[in-house]
Image (cartoon, helix red, strand yellow):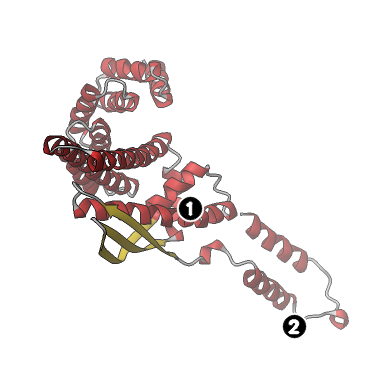
Amino acid sequence: MIFKRHIFAVISRVCHCEAKPKQSLFPFKNIMGRVWVIIIALFLFFPSPLFAETKEIISEGTYNMGDGETPSVAEGRALVQAKRTALEQAGTYVESYTKVENLQLTKDEIQVLASGIMEVEILNKKRTVVGDGIHFWVKIKAKVNPDKIEEMAKRVKEKSVVEDYKKIQEAYDKNQKEIEELKKQLAGAKGEKKKKQVEAKITDEERLFEASQWFDKGYQHALNKEYDNAIESYTKAIALDPNYAQAYNNRGVAYYDKGQHDRAIEDYNKAIALDPNLASAYNNRGVAYGLSGNMGRAISDFQKACDMGNEKGCKGLQMVLEKR
């Protein structure tokens, strides 16, 4: 690190200089005394990230629940908003740390890293009747532990990790837009039949929102190498949305990381059946087939992933062909 090299450079210059007691500004009689003064001064004025404290962030989120919505999901939406607000501040903190440590991360990687190490605690929550709806308010405390940053920085370098994070955020945004539109439709619906149709759609969107929440939890567990918890969360996401191809794919990765290659392949098969254009699932299945000794299928899957523009698939294909 530049800072540490600077310290040793200063020490080197001090240790090789000639002592001039009469002109010295230091009250010490030996060179090592001067060295310690410089070291202490540098750490006082330029504290090392090694001694950085855990960052605590307080943030709030709100949501107005309308007709057709359920309280638990409405509260979940308020919580998502609070987490996003906290994540912005956590990202700024992580960015400052990574610059000092010269970790060279992109903006997206910094956001993923911050989300992976941020621990959230709900401090307070309230429900207030406002007009015909209910106003939900959630207050949280988010902690960012700098001790985990460097280890997590290595994991977020994977392109698929960043892509998954973006998909999670896009799913939340899409769901929120859909629910707001449905609330407008419900307010203007005429007749009981039309209202029930719109309410049914709201119920479906709430189910998808909950599935995204569980997928998000699984993603965070996987980032922290908590594979059993990740599998449990992805399984709950799939139970809520049986057509969630990405959840099958990610659960397959968790099984693979546990060494359960056959179960991983089963999930990759399901993901591909649901979404034949999911390139990462072909690549992941190719890796599992390769380690299982089925090189023919591995090549086929890597080729398919590569044709779809998946870089890891192209690299996997090249490696397999070179070894044949």
In the current view of this chain or complex, which residue is farthest to the bottom? 27
Q: Is residue 247 above or below residue 67?
A: above
Depth order, front residue of 297/127? 127
| Left or right of residue 219, residue 50 in this image | right
Mark 2 lies on residue: 28
Depth order, front residue of 165/37? 165
Q: Residues within 10 Å of mark 2 (few under 14, many from 20)?
A: few
Where in the figure is residue 78, as x and y percent of width and height? Answer: 31, 55
Q: Residues within 10 Å of mark 1 (few under 14, many from 20)?
A: many
Say which amino acid is labelled 2: Phe
Instruction: Residue 159: name its quadrant.
Output: top left
Q: Quadrant of the N terminus?
A: bottom right
Q: Quadrant of the C terminus?
A: top left
Q: Is residue 157 above or below residue 274?
A: below
Depth order, front residue of 242/162? 242
Q: Residue at x 52, y 55 (%)?
A: 92
Mark 1 lies on residue: 91
Q: Residue at x 31, y 42 (%)?
A: 180
Say which amino acid is labelled 1: Gly
Instruction: Tell me which numbered mark, 1 or 2, is placed earlier along the sequence.
Output: 2
Kindly report the distance in space between the C-alpha atoms of the residues bearing marks 1 and 2.
45 Å
